[in-house]
Amino acid sequence: MKLLKAFHAKGLRDVVLCPGSRSGPLALAAGALANGELLKLQNSIDERSAAFFALGRSSSQGVAPAVITTSGTAVANLLPAAVEADRSCQPLLLLTADRPNRLKDCGANQTVNQEDFLRSVCRGFFSGPPEGAHFLSEEALDSLVNEAWENAHCLPGPVHINFPFEEPLHASRVQQVKIFSGWTPTSDRGDFNSFGEGNVLLSKKTSRSFPALDPSRPGLIVAGPWQGLNQNLSGFKNALSRWQSISGWPIFADPLSGVSFDQQGLIHSWELLIPFVFNLYDFQIQILRLGPMPASRNLERWLSEVDSKQVLITEGNFRNLDPLGLSSQWDGGLLQWVELIEKSNQIDFVQNQNHLFMKDFGSLDLVAQDWLDDQLPLKGPVNEPSLARWLPRLLPKGFSVMLAASSPVRDWIKFAGKGSQNRRCFGFRGASGIDGTLSLALGLCAEERIFLVTGDLALLHDTNGWLMTNAEDHFLIIFLIDNRGGGIFDQLQLETDPRSDFHLLFAMPQEVDHALIASAHSIPSREVSCLEDLNSSLDWAFAQKSNVLLRASTCRETDAVLRRNLAKGLVQFLEKIPKDSLSDL
């Protein structure tokens, strides 16, 4: 009880509880605090889904929730979400119960080396007294809580706290009455002045010097997926606006960047324009990169070949985020970087070359957007580029979007256009896994009404997430793009031996009726049979008072061809435009 109360005083508001006997003391404490409305409690029978649900909460609220599990393989199931929390820089507390030291290495049931399962991806690991948590003194408890909370939020990420519990594990009825009445029974089993092992697993390095760029010369801003606490996003966007107004540089923004649609300088068709536009200029372009790389092979290829000075700014993440190895990286955050540039450069004008560069880019972008509208009308068979084009336009205000990893996020980069920034888009591309997709979206629903766009394999990967869809505060619309397998592999144009079975080895289609799965969990569903049905299907979904599933069937093979034809067709169309007429478009 004292442990969770101490974390509550730090800011803990959400706990996700998984079943188990050894974790009984933690479960009882969580239940008592939830009963007193100090904590919000969600239960889950699957530790993997529970951890991803908590990660969604973390991304939405900007503070660490806690996941409580029992011992053994339950702890191992936390690893996928811990990996994503580490790479996407989101705070997370993982509280696991364990056997006391006397039961270690002697064949005792459900006793494993769970202290090591999560170490490699956690900001810190802490262990209660090996003889049992009842030896934890108040001084040691306060020290544990302070250090664990700080480690989870300094460079945000997961923290693992492992608690050995000695029997008896379960309070008597009399004791439970006292606990739920707000009184915590004391133990007469002694006192332990240390909470055992506690160490920071990721120590900060501060050797990088401040890298500057010259806003009076041509440049480009690449805004990758947002990696920071949700409450810090507004300061980041303000700094971006200040830098763009100083420099006049165009912005390539990932849909997951958090950049707003009204931001000046946005180029909406940047991924499709890259193969064409940079061949038009012979001057050196400076590159300001914000956060990790967007999911664009065109951008990565161009950045690796262009002769330019590149600066990479992260929001406190001091780890190397440059797979190209071509940038000077600085972890002080964009806001501080812009303030330092403003102090060192008395610049109140932008050179004419910058204006022309931005104007040409903006003109090409408008042409590209009109061309895409003609190529992807809202009629005919459902296809994935058209869904990416029209969904962000048709969704009502107030709904945020979560894009599953793999094809959905890539299609929004290419085809969503202005709609990609007209609402907050969440995505979890720290490790780019598809596991936990449904649970992540449900976790986001604490603060946001969420529209999840997912593929069929990603949804199947987290079927236990359906078990948490009955919570009262969830309102999730699941838009399933069912292309019967891993459509991303068709886009790779893999050359295979005639004797190999591409579908078996890569696409892996599954004969599962998603509507039946949804129905088993009392989730209503509806089929989107053609693009003309999209508006009415969305109206139906938003009229419901609970979670719903919309399913659109597509053909991954023909959609892969359509994507390639659109990319080639746009370049061919633009090549017909004389260079000296760009500014007049």
Image (tube, rainbow, N blue to C red):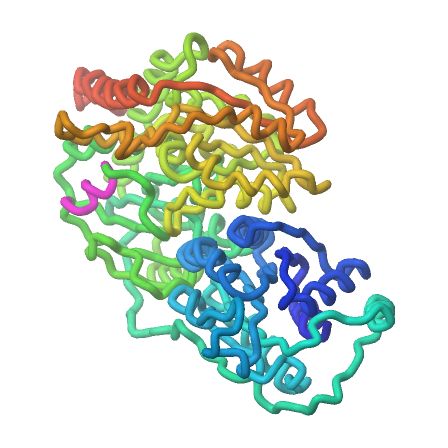
Please determine whether, in this image, residue 115 is positioned above or below residue 533.
Answer: below
Give residue 501's position: percent from left, percent from top.
22, 28
- Pick the quarter of the image with the C terminus: top left
Residue at 26% x, 45% y is 219
Q: Which residues are the magenta region? A: 298-305
Q: Is residue 392 visible?
A: no
Residue at 33% x, 60% y is 345
Q: Is residue 418 magenta?
A: no
Magenta span dominant secondary structure:
helix
Report the side of 269 relative to 141 (left or right). left
- Pick the quarter of the image with the N terminus: bottom right
The one of 307 and 442 positioned closer to us in this rendering = 442
Q: Residue furthest front?
A: 107
Please determine whether, in this image, residue 80 is positioned above or below residue 475.
Answer: below
Report the side of 503 relative to 4 (left or right). left
Give residue 38's position: percent from left, percent from top.
76, 61
Give residue 394's position: percent from left, percent from top.
54, 21
- Quadrant of residue 20 in the image? bottom right
Numbered label tally: 0
Give residue 179's position: percent from left, percent from top.
82, 70
The one of 181 and 290 positioned closer to us in this rendering = 181
Q: Is residue 299 magenta?
A: yes
